[in-house]
Amino acid sequence: MPQPPSPASRDEPVIRERGDACPGALRLHAADDGFLARVRLPGGLLTVRQASVLALAADRFGDGHLELTSRGNVQLRGLADGCGGGLAELLDGAGLLPAPSHERVRNIVATPMSGLDGADGADRPDGADGPAGPDGLDAPALAMEFDRLLCASPWAAGLSGRFLFAFDDGRGDVASLGPDVTVLGRAAGRALVRLGRAADAVELAGPDAPRAALAAARYFLDAAAEAGTQAWRVSELPAEHALRTAEFVRRLEDAGIAAHAVGAVDWPYAAPPRPGPHGAGGRDRATLCVLPPLGRVGSAQWRVLAAVAEEGGGGLRVTPWRSVVLPSVKTDAPARVEDAGLVIAPDSPWETVTACTGRPGCAKSLADVRADARAVADRARGPLPVHWSGCERRCGHPRGTAWVDLVATGAGYRITAPGRPVPHDVRPPELAAALADARNDPDVVKK
Ligand code: SF4
């Protein structure tokens, strides 16, 4: 079971000796296993046709696999040199490249189970009155509306590829991912908008949230320009240029959006959807959450998901936890998905294990971290999430939670767990026992 947020979160290092090198669908990244393309999926939303096109692209140009990212996007790897034009044409034809100038800034996550799991007032984790889900803030719909506004704003192309927007229906799942701009659903169709990690927020009508999020992005770019430090994210602004809620309210008023500041907010937290069927899918139907081990899906497996989604009629939702939510699937869908080698069982050892690319895809890696993770997954279970990294950069590590950190050293792995001594150079024969020990520390788990 995933753990709630804790003070043990760690920030990724700020790298300023080079420009923002985030890959995109048009700006490919040269990796050791070929070129890599990252296709942004605002809200993680995909139609069945778009999903089918991604499988085709993986087979035609790449290594036949898709990777799910920690922002609910999809990556294609092993792309051949010179395939960029063909890939862009394919993606564009499926509506996956609506604004080429903005393709890398469409980093938008949304509550994947919004409207699907029957959340209602009684279920609200923040204890507020009124519905947060089906009758409240429709997080995916607002994310799509915001994406349209973002792509229609030429200045927004100046955001970095790391700036993150979150549309959370009120439960506190994607709001816990450390976004730069957070929209959080409240009772009676209201919403909060938070800048960075501010304790306070502004409150406004839910339908105004996309325009308010756009105004927040503009405010950040103005502050970053004034600071002159090339900040990529809200938290990187120097203190004297930090975003202020009062100024944000003033800007919203100028944009014709009625809003007022609210004091310190008790920000809610909800765990990610667990693998398996979830309720409220209608008669003989369910919403199915599917977990591909380590976020990697073969094109044949992906086509199974697309076929199941087509029967459900609700498309696919790629989550920031490297899973896929399929609304309203038939009763035989779980068995078909499991037969394809994908995880639908809660308490699978893969639920809390993530890894960076490692060897052979990344030249910086000191180990084949995915192979090592697979080798011990069954024998190193525990409540604390674990992330395997091939080097100190720790790409894709968990956010907003305590986690066990394995970093390849060349002679083994350094294993770091909150509040624990740090064993260095743990070699494969001892890895399973050492990792199981770190993941089950009772002092950390009970917090
Ligand atoms: S953490 Fe290091 S080894 Fe892993 S993908 Fe990132 S740069 Fe490569």
Image (cartoon, rainbow, N blue to C red):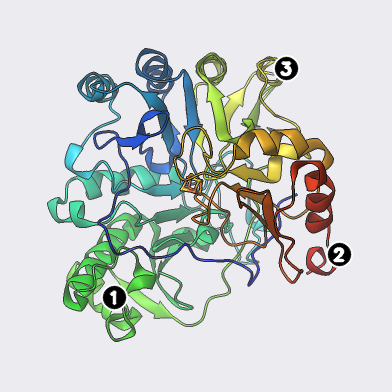
Q: Amino acid at mark 2?
A: Pro
CA distance for labels 2 and 3: 36 Å
Q: Residue at x 82, y 50 (%)?
A: 436
- The residue depicted at 25 percent of the width and 37 percent of the height is 27
Residues marked 3 and 1 touching at CB (< 8 Å): no
Return the x and y of residue 443 as percentages of the image width and height: 83, 69
**Side (left or right) of 103 relative to 71:** left
Asked whether mark 3 lies closer than 8 Å to ligand 1, one says no
- Res 418 quadrant in image: bottom right
Q: Label 1, secondary structure: give it.
A: helix
Query: Which residue occupies the extreme front position in the image?
Result: 411
Labelled disc at residue 346: none
Where's residue 327, x and y in %?
Answer: 57, 29
For badge 1, the amino acid type reads: Phe
Look at mark 2 in the image and give the residue it sits on.
Answer: 442
At label 3, counting other C-alpha atoms closer than 10 Å, the crowd grade (few under 14, some 14-19, many 20 or more) is: few
Q: Is residue 391 above or below residue 297?
A: below
Q: Which residue is mark 1?
A: 248
Mark 3 — residue?
A: 335
Note whether residue 435 is visible: yes
- For the C terminus, which image quadrant? bottom right
Query: Foreground: 362 or 123?
Result: 362
Q: In this view of the protein, which residue sits in the foreground, 202 or 24? A: 24
| Label whose residue precedes the other's in the sequence (3 or 1) | 1
Q: Secondary structure at mark 2?
A: helix
